[in-house]
Amino acid sequence: MLSLVIITGLLAFTSSKPCGTGESHSELLLSMNKNLLRSLENQEGLPNPSVHLALRLSDSHNLAKEAEHLNRLKSSLHDDIQSSLSSSQSVVGLLALYTLALKSSCHDLTTVTFTVSDKSETLLTNLKNQMEREKEHIAFSHRPLTNYYQYSLGVLALCVSGVRVNSHVTNKLIKAVEHEHFKHGDTESIDTYAVAGMALQCVKDSGSHVQNAAELETAITTIKQKLLAARRPDGHIGNEFSTGLAVQALLAMGNEVADCAPSMKAMRTAAENNIYHNPMSMSQTLPALSKKSYLSVKNKACLNEDDTLVLEPIDPVEVLPSQTKVAVTVEVVPSSGEAAVYSVNVPKSSSLLEALTLLQERNVGFTFQTESSLWGPFLSVINGEQARQSDRRYWQTSSEGTALSQGIGDFKIVADQRITIRNTSY
C-alpha cells in the first residue's frame, strides 16, 4: 500500500534576519509553491495528501487547482483507503494525512465516511479505531502495527481536528520517546521525532492530557534536544530530507525562529540547488520555510485567501541520454546473507531505478519489483524475496557504504560506484 517509514545539531548562530526575510526569500517561496502546484499536473498514481496540505498552508494559492486536487483526494485516495480498510490493513499514516489535507481545506470531516464490516462510520471514527488497534499492538509487542511515524501522525491528525486523544494512546507515544524507540534500523528517525513533537505539543496545547503532565513535558523537551543534537555543521537536521519536518516541529514546540536560522539557511540553499525536486520533500519543506507547521491547520479559516498563484506555460525540455557511461556494481544481500553481485553500465545521471531496470533487462539473474509510496517507487521484491512492512523488513539501499537518503527514483548515478541492497529488519 504505502510506506511511510522514512529515514532519520546544536543551537547555532543567530542574525538580525534569522529566517531570511526579503525579496529573494519571497521569490524562492513562490518558486517552490509553483513547482509543487505544477507537480499535480505530472502526478502519477494516487493524489498526494501531503502535497495538498503544503499548498493549503502556503500564503499564495491557485484555488481552482487546489479544489480540483481536493476532489481527487475525495475520490481516488478515498477509494484506495476504503479498499485497505475493507481488507483489514493498517493505514493509520495515510488516514492521518488524508484527515490533515481535508482539514486544511476546511472540509467538514463529519461528511466523510468509510464502511467497514457493513458499518458506516466517519473518517475520524475510523482513525480513532485504527489508533486503538495500534495502541493494543504496542501493549503486547512494544511496537505499533505500522511504525511510530504513522502512530504520531495519527495522534497529530486527531488532535488538530479537535478530537480528544485517548490518554492511553498519548502515553504510548510518550513512553516511546522515553525509551528511544524511534529507530529506523540502527539509526534514530528524525522524521519520527519531528512528527511526535508536533503531536505531543498539540495534545499539550489542547489541555486534554490530564495524566502525567510532567511526563508529557519531559517528552517534548527530549524531542527538542534530539532534534537540535542532530543538526549537522551545514545546518541540516538529520539529512536534507528530514530538515523540513524537524524545523516545523521546533517552531511548533515553541523554539524561537532564530533557533532555526542555520537550518532555514540550509533548506534555502538546498532549494536553490533543486535538491527538493521530489514533491513529497517539497511538501514537507515549504511549510517550514514559510515558518509554519502542521499545527497551523488547527486554526485555518480558509477566508480571504490570496488567489493570485498562476502557472506560466513552460516549453517542454527534451533531455537526451548522456553519452557518458558509468559502471554500477549492484550487491544484493538477502536475508540469508549470501550476497550476489552484478554489474551494468548506465548513462551518467541515470536514476537508480533506471539502472536496476537496465540490469534486469540484461537477464543475468537479477529481478526486482516495486510498490508505490508517497515518496515514489520503493523496492519490495528482489530476486523473488520480499521485504514486507508486515514483517518489519525493508530493502536498505546504500552507496559505497552510506545509506541513501533519496528513493530509487530520485538518486542519480553520476560516477562509477557500488550499490548495496540489503534485506533489513527494523
Image (cartoon, grey):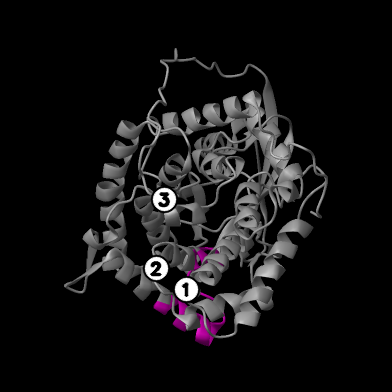
Per the model, the C-alpha gap separating discs 3 and 1 is: 31 Å
| Residue 261 visible to an observer of this rendering | yes
Residue 333 in the image: x percent, y percent? 65, 57
What residue lies at 49% left-to-right and 52% top-to-bottom?
A: 296
Residue 43 in the image: x percent, y percent? 39, 35
The numbered mark, 3 or 1, whose residue comes first in the sequence reads 1
Tally the numbered discs: 3
Q: Which residue is mark 1?
A: 145
Q: Nearer the viewer, residue 178 or 418?
A: 178
What residue lies at 69% left-to-right and 39% top-to-bottom?
A: 19
Q: Dot 2, crowdedness within 10 Å: few (<14), some or many (≥20)? A: many
Looking at the image, residue 84 sits to the left or right of residue 415; the answer is left
Q: Which residue is mark 3?
A: 300
Looking at the image, residue 8 sits to the left or right of residue 281; the answer is right
What residue lies at 65% left-to-right and 24% top-to-bottom?
A: 24
Judge whether residue 143 is colored magenta: yes
Amino acid at pointer 2:
Ser
Cβ–Cβ below 8 Å for labels 1 and 2?
A: yes
**Labels 3, 1: front one:** 3
Badge number at residue 90: 2
The numbered mark, 1 or 2, whose residue comes first in the sequence reads 2
The numbered mark, 3 or 2, whose residue comes first in the sequence reads 2
